[in-house]
Image: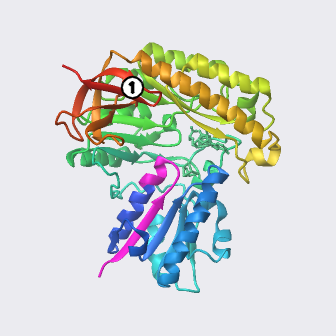
Amino acid sequence: MNKRIYIETYGCQMNVVDSEIIFSIMAKEGYERVGAMDEADIILANTCSVRDNAEQRIWGRVEEFRKCKERNPEVIVGIVGCMAERLKDKLILTGKVDLVAGPDTYRTLPEMVKEITPDKPGINVLLSREETYADIIPVRTDKNGVSAFISIMRGCNNVCSYCVVPYTRGAERSRDPHSILAEARDVFSKGYKEVTLLGQNVDSYLWDEGDGEKMDFPGLLAAVAGIDPSLRVRFATNHPKDISDSLLETMAAHDNICKHIHLPVQSGSDRLLEKMRRRYSREWYMERVRKIREILPGCGITTDVIAGFCSETEEDHQATLSLFREAAFDYAYMFCYSERPGTLASRKYPDDVPPEVKTRRLNEIIDLQNQLSLESNRRDIGKVFEVLVEGPSRKNPEELRGRAGSDKMCVFPGEGHKAGEYVNVEITSCTSATLLGRIAE
Ligand code: SAH
Ligand code: SF4
Ligand code: F3S
């Protein structure tokens, strides 16, 4: 009988792709993917270290995994991904896991698994300067067969002082564009209608063909968009210091490049941006927002923000709130600062904003953003958007859900349409999270 593997994926979209890569590598060894841990011979958590609560959650899951192992001692329980890279052999020393594998070591998983015995765990946390898994065709794990993630680069060369990602993912490297295009063509031929190109900082994508020819991110994006007009292209994440006019112009030139930019701001205070080592000012950020709105009217702009970074004063916090109002984001991912061991901030700056102050500030940002999201959605009432149907609405199975180019979720009566189709939807009402509408005449 085939051996079976189960993976729980946490963290960002990069980890989603990495789990698909692991499934692909293990499938070559005869491992079948299963959806329940008690059916599996190998149980893995693909983990995130970005905030402490992300890691705490994993520990709870490992306890669950251990219960399967108590029932069947042959089962291998492993931690892979960012937490594996951050904690390394400390994870083995807990005695709770048999396998620890960092993000650049997945090709070695089959060998590691073969060598693991009840008293000999396996560990590989080497980071690589070259690994991009370019030749590995991920086993897609999305549920609807409409939208696929494609990793175009790995690692990060920035040194944002709060961030653990450069330590868990290593140095930045770009993937061969030929393999990216081949993967995009392949998913399109299998019926997918949307690809999202992924990197921690897509604007610094660069491939040297070796013959003097170079491919930058706008070039790559245009090439992927050129595959077929009915293939939608998205990408994430952009860094405000690197997002170029040439990217915006490329977006404007292709109808099938979705008009949405995720542009994490982190703070509205210049003093904190400096301390965070973001290498842009508030003024620079707002100039980029204005440029996006000028070149791409109607473009969705979303952001990430951290409340309560080291030494944040009430004035700094007010600056973040005022930047949010000025930028009028469509949506935001909002977090309390969480000190990560080993980062520059953890070494240089005390984590001195009391937890209750962090939470209060975070809630103020959330309240403001809810209001901004609602206002942004209200401005869309009466407009018609081309929506790519993803499937039935979560709340009402009679209705369909799908995204507009701006990334806003739209819900509408389906009238016989199904996942993977494009429909024009006229927006008739909204909540702060969703646009509601009907199929346009
Ligand atoms: N490469 C992406 C972000 C990756 S991490 C970028 O630079 O935009 C995703 C988000 O997590 C970050 O944008 C930041 O808002 C948040 N984050 C990162 N480290 C954090 C920390 N130590 N505490 C709280 N939030 C953090
Ligand atoms: Fe972290 Fe900054 Fe790199 Fe984003 S750009 S992954 S926040 S170091
Ligand atoms: Fe992603 Fe979390 Fe790692 S955000 S890169 S899985 S630390």
The residue lying furthest to the top in this view is 294
| Residue 219, position as x, y percentages in the image | 38, 32
| In magenta stretch: residue 160 | no
| 20 vs 182, nearest the viewer | 20
Q: Report whether the residue tagged 1 is closer than 8 Å to ligand 1.
A: no
The residue lying furthest to the left in this view is 416
Does 19 sit above or below residue 116?
A: above
| 256 vs 432, nearest the viewer | 432
The residue lying at 30 percent from left, 34 percent from top is: 232
| Any part of residue 368 in sight | yes
Give the quadrant of residue 92: bottom right
Does 43 sit above or below residue 170?
A: below
Task: Tell whether 11 sits left or right of 381.
Answer: right
The residue lying at 72 percent from left, 22 percent from top is: 318
| Any part of residue 101 in sight | no
Residue type at mark 1 is: Lys
| Residue 196, position as x, y percentages in the image | 38, 40
Does 102 sit above or below residue 363?
A: below
Give the quadrant of residue 227: top left
Quarter of the image for the C terminus: give it.
top left
Does 366 sit above or below residue 209?
A: above
Q: Which residue is mark 1?
A: 259
Pointer 1: residues within 10 angstroms few (<14), some, or many (20+)? many
Quarter of the image for the N terminus: give it.
bottom left
| Residue 388, position as x, y percentages in the image | 28, 34
| 142 vs 392, nearest the viewer | 392
Q: Which residues are magenta?
A: 1-17
| Residue 202, position as x, y percentages in the image | 48, 37
The residue lying at 44 percent from left, 56 percent from top is: 18
The residue lying at 21 percent from left, 49 percent from top is: 190
Report ligand 1 position as a quadrant: top right
